[in-house]
Amino acid sequence: MTYETPNGTAVLWRWTGAGDPRSAVLSLNAERGSASTRCGSTPGRAELRLAPGVYRYAASDGGGVERGVVAVDTYSDEWRPAAPVLAPNLARRVAADGRGLAGRWWLFVVAIAAFAAEWAWRRREGLP
């Protein structure tokens, strides 16, 4: 059972009792109301897509009752920032060279010369 899940993802219940999985009745209570459903179409697991909120559940398989709380968060995984990843070949080149851009001063000279040449051309043409 997952105790929390992002919005748009199903809450998963799995059979953890002894013996073969049996179907169970799952009762959910939330601030907005309550619902009851039979889980067991797939032996040993059930998935429910719920709206964001906090739900109290009770799962009964005829022999006992399991109670707990599950939360569906309002965030969604596509809005979570991804971990930055450095491409392996770029990492190898920088590590092998060890200088980076600061060690290539001539690139800055080329860029400044290009900007100065463009400025001079624009002035000669009468452009601002």
Image (spheres, rainbow, N blue to C red):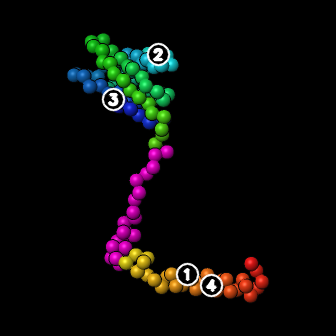
Q: Residues within 10 Å of mark 3 (few under 14, many from 20)?
A: few
Percent coordinates x, y for residue 85 in the rendering: 40, 59
Q: Which mark is residue 34?
A: 2
CB within 8 Å, label 4 to label 3 = no
Q: Give the CA separation, mark 2 to mark 1.
A: 67 Å
Disc 4 element? helix
Residue 87 highlighted magenta (yes or no): yes
Report which residue position mark 1 lands on: 111
N-term-proximal mark, 2 vs 1: 2
Q: 11 or 105, which is in the foreground?
A: 105
N-term-proximal mark, 3 vs 2: 3
- Say what amino acid the circle numbered 1 marks: Ala
Q: Residue at x 36, y 23 (%)?
A: 69
Q: Residues within 10 Å of mark 1 (few under 14, many from 20)?
A: few
Q: Which mark is residue 1?
A: 3
Q: Give the CA separation, mark 4 to mark 3.
A: 66 Å
N-term-proximal mark, 4 vs 3: 3
Which callout, 4 or 1, points to the residue nearer the camera?
4
CB within 8 Å, label 4 to label 1 = no
Q: Residue furthest left?
A: 18
Q: Is residue 9 visible?
A: no
Q: Quadrant of residue 48?
A: top left
N-term-proximal mark, 4 vs 1: 1
Percent coordinates x, y for residue 94 in the rendering: 37, 73
Disc 3 element? loop
CB within 8 Å, label 2 to label 4 = no
Q: Give, as a single range, the part of the protein colored magenta.
A: 78-98
Q: 34 or 24, which is in the foreground?
A: 34
Q: Which mark is residue 116?
A: 4
Q: Give the CA separation, mark 2 to mark 4.
A: 72 Å
Disc 1 element? helix
* 109 displayed left or right of 115: left
